[in-house]
Image (spheres, rainbow, N blue to C red):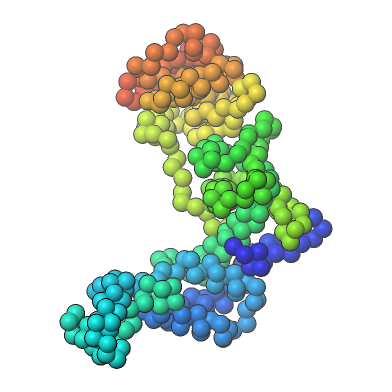
Amino acid sequence: MPEALLTVSCYGGMVVPHFLGAQDHPWLRTVLDEHARFRSRPRRELDERLREGLPCAAPAGKVRLTLHVLGRLWPTERPRDLPPPRLLRSVVFSEAARSRDEPQRALERVAERLQLNVTALRAALFADLAGERLVGESPRSLDAGALALRVNLALAQGLLFRAVHVRVTASDGVRRVVRLAKLHGLICTVDRREEPELSISGPYALFRRTLVYGRALASLLPALGWCPRFRLEADCVLGQQPRVLRLQSGDPIFPGDEPRRFDSRVEERFARDIARLAPEWNVLREPEAMPAGASLIFPDFALEHRYDGRRWLVEILGFWSPEYVARKLAGLRAAGIANLVLCVAEGRNCSEDALPPLARVVRFRRWVDAVAVLRAIEEGG
């Protein structure tokens, strides 16, 4: 996103985004109505109309940003039931070169051959160009409120594209964020603190400021929207000046798709069975990270007794790769967790020396036996 489109204010060393809110919904509704009014007409006609300005009062900077974002959200299409424009151009130009007639005559002959209307043929010749593509139908569920959140997300992501360094803390769900960061190849570390802090190098810290890396970093932001509580602080460069951006849970940013609550059906069934068999135990998915030597581990579940305050961690070592199992066991041994139930899939050749010495071990074949886990907890006191 061009820096000129970023609607922000700078105070000292801070950068404050001008997020869209409820006060912007009336003119956002007008923008959506204008797009819908040009349905099935060339995109260039809509652009010409929008350059004339909106028929209502609206902040110019926010309007420019909104039109930029909406241009990517609103679909376009080429005329239906017609051959591809590239093929039509080839046929028409070949006919014109062969016959050396007036262009109109060549169009008429090709239209007759293809059983098309001349006007439709002329409109379809360059329908693959951006300005000639037809304005499509409104995206589903895109109202003024949803559009405001999407524009705010794009604004925040545009600032992260200019980040040198990013720090993220989250109360829950941080494991998903760490997993996503590593999946996208981001350079990151997790620091041990009261709350784990994810430290990420931004695109502007790299020797080559790659668009791919910037997009990967920006992709973390929608995932953070599903954390119950998070804080993000980014050192950015705006106008050749260093600035600090701060975002937190509650900021009006469009969240991404709801993440999967469980990594496997084994985990999903275990959580359901515990909730059904032992309602006195609260089942917490992905509780807080635990220190394990110089790093952190993220247990699968925490079981908390509602009445006597007992708390046990449950780790399920299912059908993962041997390398993953080895790393997980090493982390669990280093953590030295006393109240731990380790559920190990049969077929895993885990020696007694490899298992954490303080853990209660439950073996399983296809599904984790919730009764066996509860029995192990009771035997552990």
x then y, percent, for residue 287:
55, 33
Counting labels gives: 0
Q: Residue lying farthest right? A: 12
**Res. 207 image quadrant:** top right
**Is 104 placed left or right of 68 in the picture?**
left
**Is 346 placed left or right of 13 in the picture?**
left
**145 relative to 103, above or below:** above
x 66%, y 54%: residue: 162
Is residue 372 in view? no
> Which of 35/205 is in front?
205
Is residue 258 in view? yes
x then y, percent, for residue 200:
64, 41
x then y, percent, for residue 355:
49, 13
x 45%, y 15%: residue: 361
What quarter of the picture does the N terminus occupy? bottom right
x 41%, y 69%: residue: 75
**Is 187 placed left or right of 49 in the picture?**
right
x 28%, y 82%: residue: 97
> Which of 284/227 is in front?
227
x then y, percent, for residue 126:
36, 77
**110 relative to 155, above or below:** below
**Is 209 placed left or right of 239 in the picture?**
left
